[in-house]
Amino acid sequence: MVDGGSSDISNVYTYRLEPLLKYYGMDAVDVWFVTHGDQDHISGLLEALEKEVPIGMILFPDVILDASLEKIRMKAEAQGIGVKTFYKGDCVEAEGMKVECLYPMMQCCTGNKNGDSMVLSVEMNRKGPGCRMLLTG
């Protein structure tokens, strides 16, 4: 999962994300990537944490944690969910999919949440020709 928030839909996890996960037969999230701490990117994750949805790990960008990210970290760790920084060059691979962090690096950050958002390269090499995506926070 990458982000998953909304600024205009309340209970976005309950009404958007959870039905999607159920549709695809998923009852847990292995890895939740957080590009930055604005509410429109994290409100669904906060709601999922309140509902104690099984989450394997939460990955943050390489930035100084703001109050929103710190709140996520505390809630997640209280539930035994691992929270790590996903550094430039780090990769997560599973089932024919590779997610690599391209940005940010703390020493390059400006303090602008949007400009310092996590950028991910996603490659899927399942059946067929595969797919490559660039996800920018």
Image: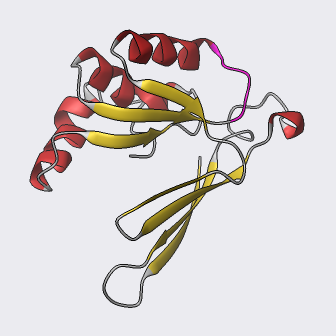
Residue 34 image point, x, y percent: 52, 36
Residue 128 image point, x, y percent: 34, 90
Q: Residue at x 80, y 27 (%)?
A: 111
- Could you say which quadrant of the image residue 60 lies in? top right
Q: Is residue 47 left or right of residue 4?
A: left
Instruction: Reply above or below: 43 against 102.
Output: above
Instruction: Reply above or below: 30 against 78.
Output: below
Q: Is residue 106 left or right of residue 34?
A: right
Residue 26 image point, x, y percent: 16, 48
Mark count:
0
Instruction: Reply above or below: 6 against 10.
Output: below
Which residue occupies the foreground of this view, 125 or 18? 125
Instruction: Reply above or below: 125 against 24.
Output: below
Principal secondary structure, stretch drawn in magenta: loop
The span picked out in magenta is 62-66
Q: Residue at x 73, y 29 (%)?
A: 63
